[in-house]
Image: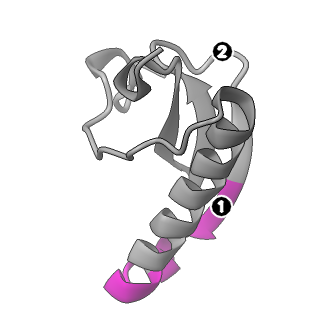
């Protein structure tokens, strides 16, 4: 299985006063696992928010490497239309 075909992703969602990071299947949030959260106010500090996202991506990479034996290359993408605000 090629790394770009892995069935999981890091999903970052704005939920209430928090921004949450999940390990999720590619086309659904069903069965997703919460990895971490950051307060929306703290996300306004660009450096802190970028470091938090890097930490969440590292957590996913470690989990994927454990299961698939390869460290994935993380690619940032927009949320699919069905997961954007109002459709979750």
Q: Which residues are magenta?
A: 36-48
Residue at the (65%, 61%) spot, across then down: 37
Describe residue 84's horizontal placement relative to residue 54 as left or right: left
62 relative to 33, above or below: below
Kindly identify which residue carries mark 2. 30
In the rendered structure, the answer to whether residue 60 lies left or right of residue 35 reads left
Q: Quadrant of residue 83?
A: top left
Q: Secondary structure at mark 1?
A: strand
Indicate whether residue 45 is drawn in magenta.
yes
Query: Residue 67: x, y in percent?
Result: 72, 30
Residue 17 seen in the figure: no
Regarding residue 38, the answer to whether it shows in the image is: yes
Residue 68 at what x, y percent from top left? Answer: 64, 28
In this rendering, would 42 be left or right of 45? right
Instruction: Look at the numbered discs 1 and 2 and tell me whether their residues touch, using CB distance below 8 Å.
Output: no
Whether residue 5 sits left or right of residue 40 in the image: it is: left
For the point 52% across and 17% down, the residue is: 7
- Labelled disc at residue 37: 1
């Amino acid at each position: 299985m090629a790394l770009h075909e892995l069935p999981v992703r890091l999903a970052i969602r704005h939920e209430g006063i928090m921004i949450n990071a999940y390990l999720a299947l590619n086309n659904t949030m069903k069965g997703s696992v919460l990895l971490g959260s950051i307060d929306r106010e703290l996300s306004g500090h660009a450096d802190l928010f970028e470091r938090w996202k890097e930490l969440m991506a590292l957590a996913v990479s470690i989990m994927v490497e454990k299961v698939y034996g390869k460290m994935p290359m993380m690619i940032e993408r927009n949320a699919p239309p069905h997961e954007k605000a109002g459709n979750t």
